[in-house]
Amino acid sequence: MINSVRNTVLSVLNKNNYGYISPSDFNQFAKQAQMDLFEDYFYNLNYQVVKENARQSGTGLVDISKGYEEVISSFSKTTTLTQATANTSKYNLPSDYYLLNVVQYNTIGAGQPGVEIEKVEENKIRSLISTNLLAPTAAFPVYVQRGNIIEVYPTTINGATNVDSYYIRNPLDPKWTWVQLTSGGPVFNASAADYQDFELPLSDEPDLVMKILEYAGVSIREGDVVKFADGELTQESQSEK
């Protein structure tokens, strides 16, 4: 899809002599455009669920929220967290995580299922661990997130493979790869080791084009390109509501 998107973007720019964007600039714009649309899935899903709960939108064959959920689920991932420091209850979050779904303690006894670790805010953990009735236990553990590290309570949960994470990862950065001809411009090379297509559905191709045109218009200081892209994106957004 990425080559098709780039060809369309260049076609729009060349048609009106707006200018040219290099492969490296295109890749930067493509990365940001994909991230913008990826984040929109979460906002759109929330908006659609609110409409369905208010009986303003149906489900069945036209189940819009299900479509959003399927795309988001394609970025689901599971991993065992590594310890920030050996033999402590501090664990590193995955480097590619966007949203944590579930953090689980996976060792509470032979043959026993894992237990979900509940997230608590920093300002509550001190009062919890100082209260006998509310203190975290292996059966009811909690964690506090500090940047890209979580600390699990009780601190007896400190094994190297004790904690699993179920999360939504960030999409991989798209990269249009090319070879430079001796007498001509760059030519698409999908066999390059660092090639990466967009990870969004094919149906998002028009929106990716418009988003990239929007960034390209700002880069080359062509207000008409930005206005064109903004208009198309606004029309697309209104048609989805």
Image (tube, rainbow, N blue to C red):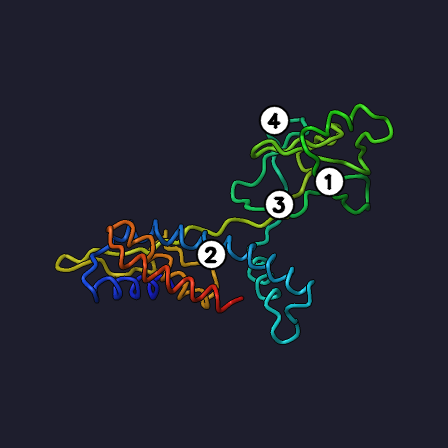
The residue lying at 46 percent from left, 68 percent from top is 203
- Counting from the top left corner in percent of width and height, residue 138 is at 80, 35
Classed neighbour count for the residue bearing mark 2: other residues with Cα under 10 Å, few (<14), some (14–19), many (≥20) = some
- Per the model, the C-alpha gap separating discs 2 and 3 is 19 Å
Question: Which quadrant of the rendered structure holds the C terminus?
Answer: bottom right
Q: Residue furthest top?
A: 130
Q: Nearer the viewer, residue 170 or 60?
A: 60
Q: Nearer the viewer, mark 4 or mark 2?
A: 2
The residue lying at 41 percent from left, 65 percent from top is 205
- Per the model, the C-alpha gap separating discs 1 and 4 is 19 Å
CB-based contact (under 8 Å), mark 2 and mark 3: no
**Residue corresponding to mark 1:** 117
- Per the model, the C-alpha gap separating discs 3 and 4 is 21 Å
CB-based contact (under 8 Å), mark 1 and mark 2: no
Indicate which disc residue 100 carries.
3
Q: Nearer the viewer, mark 3 or mark 4?
A: 3
- Counting from the top left corner in percent of width and height, residue 70 is at 59, 63
Q: Nearer the viewer, residue 217 or 66?
A: 217
- Per the model, the C-alpha gap separating discs 1 and 2 is 31 Å
Q: Secondary structure at mark 2?
A: helix
- Counting from the top left corner in percent of width and height, residue 65 is at 61, 64
Look at label 3 and name its amino acid. Answer: Leu
Which quadrant of the view contains residue 159?
top right
Which quadrant of the view contains residue 207?
bottom left
Look at label 1 and name its amino acid. Answer: Ile
Classed neighbour count for the residue bearing mark 3: other residues with Cα under 10 Å, few (<14), some (14–19), many (≥20) = some
Classed neighbour count for the residue bearing mark 4: other residues with Cα under 10 Å, few (<14), some (14–19), many (≥20) = few
**Residue corresponding to mark 2:** 37
**Is tag 2's residue or tag 3's residue first in the polypeptide sequence?**
2
Q: Nearer the viewer, residue 141 or 122?
A: 122
CB-based contact (under 8 Å), mark 4 and mark 2: no
Look at label 2 and name its amino acid. Answer: Leu
